[in-house]
Image (cartoon, rainbow, N blue to C red):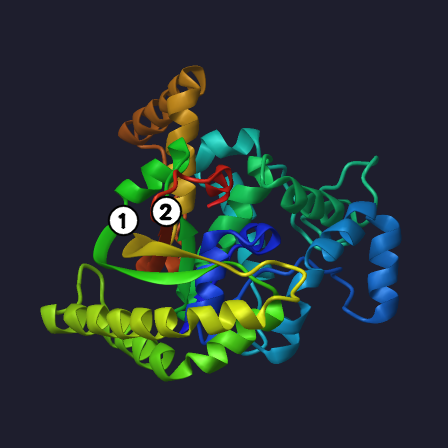
């Protein structure tokens, strides 16, 4: 069971990331890297040209054991989400339905240096986009040009590779609009780690494998191969609940032992209980909900967008050839998401980062 996780969640170790690190067979995220490569020389060059990139890499140092173990990676079958992020950036510029987002997303921002359609400013260094992405990840996503495009790109990538996507509970206007586009499939509760060192996560996964594997299998059986509009059967949902209950029992039984073993860890081991809502979403839900949120928050922009739509309709009625609708092959698929909500807590400030 492979789960895609936002790099924002990985940076701050939010519940969506911590739940995925426990539940997933493999966690896939977006790792911003220099377009020229990942050699030591490439990384040194990137750090020199994008100073905030070094701070970003330092913020991910805690996760290095997870990468070395193979639990966390940035690609599936040698394919990563970089092309999806660029496709989303391009679609925002071409799709009139997403016109409200153009005020935020700079054309060519996510293009590789030297690409014909890239449009860097004269003041931007060659790795300016890398510096901007790294800074936004560190700040928690206040720049919608970056956070929205990365989130939509991750969903597109997940739709292509049939990955689950971990999400925070809805907190922002855009997230609430996104949730309304979703189709709930099932929900269950289970204990999880809220704080832990990477090595401790790996240890607990190994120790609880006998109960984690049946839970993963039950989830996979419930959602694998679902078509548009389809839902799990009652029996499949009951199997997930039974497996979650068995895992909870095993987790509780071993918790005191885990806590004692972690006494010398630099990061204190903590636990919480989470509700996991499994939801089917359109693969472009991030784009649609973000555009709707911008319209709701900026009425003047909404009116301008509406006027353009009316102009196109008028031209079509006079015999003019309308522009074709922008179609993405991923639009024909749904993205199955795991929305992670910690029981007894309000939506975290980080929830706005999707």
Residue 132: x and y in percent read 71, 43
Residue 21: x and y in percent read 49, 67
Looking at the rendered image, the quarter that the N terminus falls into is bottom left
| Other residues around mark 2 within 10 Å, as few (<14) / some (14–19) / many (≥20) | many
Give 161 or 311, whichever is nearer the viewer: 161
Q: Identify the secondary structure beneath mark 1.
A: loop
Residue 289: x and y in percent read 37, 38
Separation of disc 1 and disc 2 at Cα? 8 Å
Write down the quadrant of residue 187 in the picture: bottom left
Is residue 15 in view from this perspective?
A: yes
List the residue tagged with mark 2.
285
Give 88 or 321, whichever is nearer the viewer: 88
Dot 1 or dot 2, earlier in sequence: 1
Residue 291 lies left or right of residue 266; in this view the side is left
Identify the residue shown where x is 63% and y is 37%: 106
List the residue tagged with mark 1.
182
Identify the residue shown where x is 42% and y is 79%: 208
Give 220 or 37, whichever is nearer the viewer: 220
| Other residues around mark 1 within 10 Å, as few (<14) / some (14–19) / many (≥20) | some
Q: Are marks 1 and 2 in contact (CB under 8 Å)?
A: yes
Identify the residue shown where x is 41% and y is 74%: 254
Is residue 97 in view from this perspective?
A: no
Residue 196 lies left or right of residue 287; in this view the side is right
Q: Residue farthest to the top?
A: 300
The total of numbered circles placed on residues is: 2
Query: Comparing marks 1 and 2, which lies closer to the viewer?
Result: 1
Q: Which mark is residue 22?
A: none
Residue 262 lies left or right of residue 273; in this view the side is right
Identify the residue shown where x is 83% and y is 36%: 122
Q: Residue farthest to the left?
A: 234
């Amino acid at each position: 069971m492979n789960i895609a996780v936002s790099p924002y969640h990985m940076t701050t170790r939010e519940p969506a990331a911590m739940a995925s690190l426990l539940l997933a067979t493999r966690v896939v995220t977006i790792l911003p890297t220099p377009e020229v490569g990942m050699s030591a020389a490439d990384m040194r060059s990137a750090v020199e040209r994008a100073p905030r990139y070094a701070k970003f890499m330092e913020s991910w140092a805690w996760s290095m054991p997870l990468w070395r173990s193979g639990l966390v990676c940035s690609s599936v079958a040698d394919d990563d989400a970089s092309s999806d992020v660029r496709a989303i950036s391009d679609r925002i510029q071409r799709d009139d339905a997403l016109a409200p987002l153009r005020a935020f997303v700079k054309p060519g921002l996510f293009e590789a240096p030297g690409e014909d359609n890239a449009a860097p400013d004269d003041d931007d260094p060659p790795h300016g986009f890398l510096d901007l992405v790294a800074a936004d990840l560190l700040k928690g996503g206040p720049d919608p040009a970056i956070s929205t495009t990365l989130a939509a790109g991750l969903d597109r990538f997940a739709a292509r590779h049939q990955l689950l996507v971990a999400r925070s509970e809805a907190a922002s206007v855009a997230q609430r609009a996104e949730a309304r586009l979703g189709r709930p499939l099932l929900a269950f509760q289970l204990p999880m780690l809220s704080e832990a060192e990477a090595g401790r996560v790996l240890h607990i996964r190994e120790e609880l494998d006998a109960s984690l594997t049946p839970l993963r299998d039950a989830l996979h059986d419930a959602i694998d191969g679902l078509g548009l509009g389809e839902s799990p059967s009652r029996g499949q949902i009951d199997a997930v609940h039974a497996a979650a209950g068995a895992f909870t029992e095993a987790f509780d039984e071993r918790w005191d032992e885990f806590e004692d073993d972690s006494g010398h860890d630099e990061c204190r081991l903590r636990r919480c209980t989470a509700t996991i809502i499994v939801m089917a979403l359109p693969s472009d839900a991030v784009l649609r909900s973000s555009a709707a949120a911008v319209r709701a928050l900026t009425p003047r922009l909404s009116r301008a967008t509406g006027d353009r739509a009316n102009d196109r309709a008028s031209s079509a009625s006079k015999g003019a050839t309308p522009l074709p609708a922008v179609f993405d092959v991923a639009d024909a698929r749904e993205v199955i998401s795991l929305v992670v909500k910690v029981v007894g807590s309000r939506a975290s400030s980080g929830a706005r980062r999707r």
